[in-house]
């Protein structure tokens, strides 16, 4: 059963988590649509939809260019079960809600994870490997919207990528390879491999620690006792080592770190199903840790298979996209109470996945 949520704190109308969000937007990918939906962050009202190429997955907002980047890894399906890998990134204007560019990364393919360095105007895009080269990270100039180069990660399937706040170090999680790839973003080279038993989502703190979900989600179908312990591995990039593990009860895919130092973790839960080796997905959990002390702060039940998490810039609101239920839970992170549930399939199409919070123009 979920743990008790954090106790509520009294709040005046001026302290409402909705206050001051007029004009802000939440963008949500409908992976099976394929669309990107936009919601008013103050009212949760649906304000528009953009149609994009098949299989949109992740989103990243560039405030300098005011562009929303969207990856398209596959023609249909998902990692290890798809009909072929795509090569495109789509650039969307969130204010006019229209596609302004489609960047073809060919011969690179399977673009998925996105990380932005606004100071250097670089967008990092994880791509899958092929017979003649390993997976890696493509570097894109956000001003010209053109590729600048590639960084090898020495693994077939880097899926998520994140950078430290200085923009000097990047971490690529690898679903199948038993390590996390560490890259020097000033020299654009692989510098270390940190042993982790297959990895999923990640987030990087201001001090350079990386919080990595492991093991690889496919391992939750493994026989009891053979799967590595589920949880969040805490990595120290300076020593290229795992320094702690934050245990979770269930497999984790989504990890997000707020501006206030709360680590948001999406736990996937299943129940036995004779027709499926991985079981039947049931409502998942949002588990919250203090990133500094590693103390677990509370839990909240969310939709089925939480796949992407983001938060508002002030760290007050959390958003959890759940791909099976195709919902987004809007959470007050101070009280850990759900404020709303957005039904993405009702508005557009099934498969809620990538998220981005888009502040209003200033």
Image: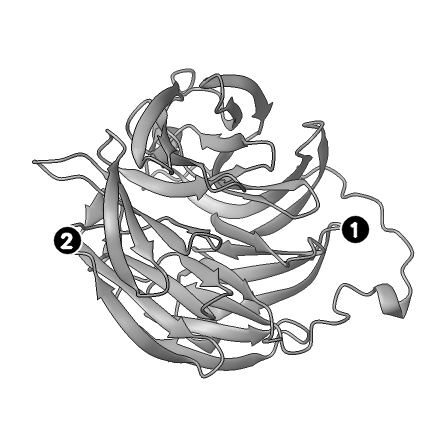
Identified at 71% across, 28% down, the residue is 295
Q: Which residue is mark 2?
A: 84
Q: Give left or right: position of 43 versus 303.
A: right
Q: Position of residue 78 (x, y in %)?
A: 27, 50
Frontmost residue, 77 versus 68? 68
Identified at 49% across, 60% down, the residue is 355
Q: Secondary structure beneath disc 2?
A: loop
Q: Secondary structure beneath disc 1?
A: loop
Q: Give left or right: position of 345 versus 320.
A: left
Q: Quadrant of residue 361?
A: bottom right
The answer to whether residue 304 of the structure is visible from this angle is: no
Identified at 85% across, 63% down, the residue is 15
Q: Which residue is mark 1?
A: 335
Frontmost residue, 348 versus 144? 144
As displayed, is residue 62 above or below residue 259? Answer: below
Q: Position of residue 191 (x, y in %)?
A: 34, 24
Q: Quadrant of residue 5?
A: top right
As displayed, is residue 333 above or below residue 352? Answer: above
Q: Position of residue 34 (x, y in %)?
A: 32, 70
N-terminal of the pair, mark 1 or mark 2, is 2
Give the quarter of the figure containing the N terminus. top right
Q: Give left or right: position of 184 versus 238.
A: left
Frontmost residue, 229 versus 127? 127
Q: Give left or right: position of 180 versus 9.
A: left
As displayed, is residue 92 above or below residue 264? Answer: below
């Amino acid at each position: 059963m979920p743990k008790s949520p954090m106790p509520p704190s009294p709040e005046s109308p001026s302290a409402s988590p909705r206050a001051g969000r007029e004009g802000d937007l939440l963008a949500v990918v409908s992976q099976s649509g394929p669309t990107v939906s936009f919601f008013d962050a103050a009212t949760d009202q649906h304000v528009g939809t953009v149609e994009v190429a098949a299989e949109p997955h992740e989103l990243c907002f560039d405030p300098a260019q005011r562009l929303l980047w969207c990856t398209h890894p596959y023609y249909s399906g998902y990692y290890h079960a798809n009909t072929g890998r795509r090569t495109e990134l789509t650039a969307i204007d969130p204010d006019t809600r229209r596609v302004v560019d489609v960047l073809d990364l060919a011969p690179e393919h399977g673009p998925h994870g996105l990380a932005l360095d606004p100071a250097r105007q670089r967008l990092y895009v994880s791509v899958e490997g092929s017979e003649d080269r390993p997976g890696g990270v493509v570097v894109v100039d956000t001003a010209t919207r053109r590729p600048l180069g590639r960084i090898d990660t020495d693994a077939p399937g880097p899926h998520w990528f994140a950078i430290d706040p200085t923009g000097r170090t990047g971490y690529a999680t690898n679903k199948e390879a038993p390590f996390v790839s560490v890259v020097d973003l000033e020299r654009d080279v692989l510098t270390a491999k940190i042993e982790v038993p297959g990895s999923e989502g990640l987030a990087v703190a201001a001090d350079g620690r990386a919080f990595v979900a492991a093991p690889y989600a496919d391992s939750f179908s493994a026989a009891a006792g053979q799967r590595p312990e589920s949880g969040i591995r805490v990595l120290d990039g300076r020593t290229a080592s795992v320094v702690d593990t934050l245990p979770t009860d269930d497999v984790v895919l989504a990890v997000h770190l707020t501006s206030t130092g709360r680590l948001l973790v999406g736990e996937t839960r299943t129940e036995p199903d004779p027709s499926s080796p991985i079981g039947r997905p049931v409502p998942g959990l949002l588990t919250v840790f203090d990133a500094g002390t590693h103390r677990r702060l509370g839990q909240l039940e969310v939709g089925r298979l939480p796949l992407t998490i983001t938060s508002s810039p002030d760290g007050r609101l959390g958003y959890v996209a759940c791909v099976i239920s195709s919902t987004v839970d809007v959470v007050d992170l101070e009280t850990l109470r759900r404020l709303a549930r957005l039904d993405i399939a009702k508005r557009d199409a099934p498969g809620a996945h990538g998220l981005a919070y888009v502040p209003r123009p200033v």
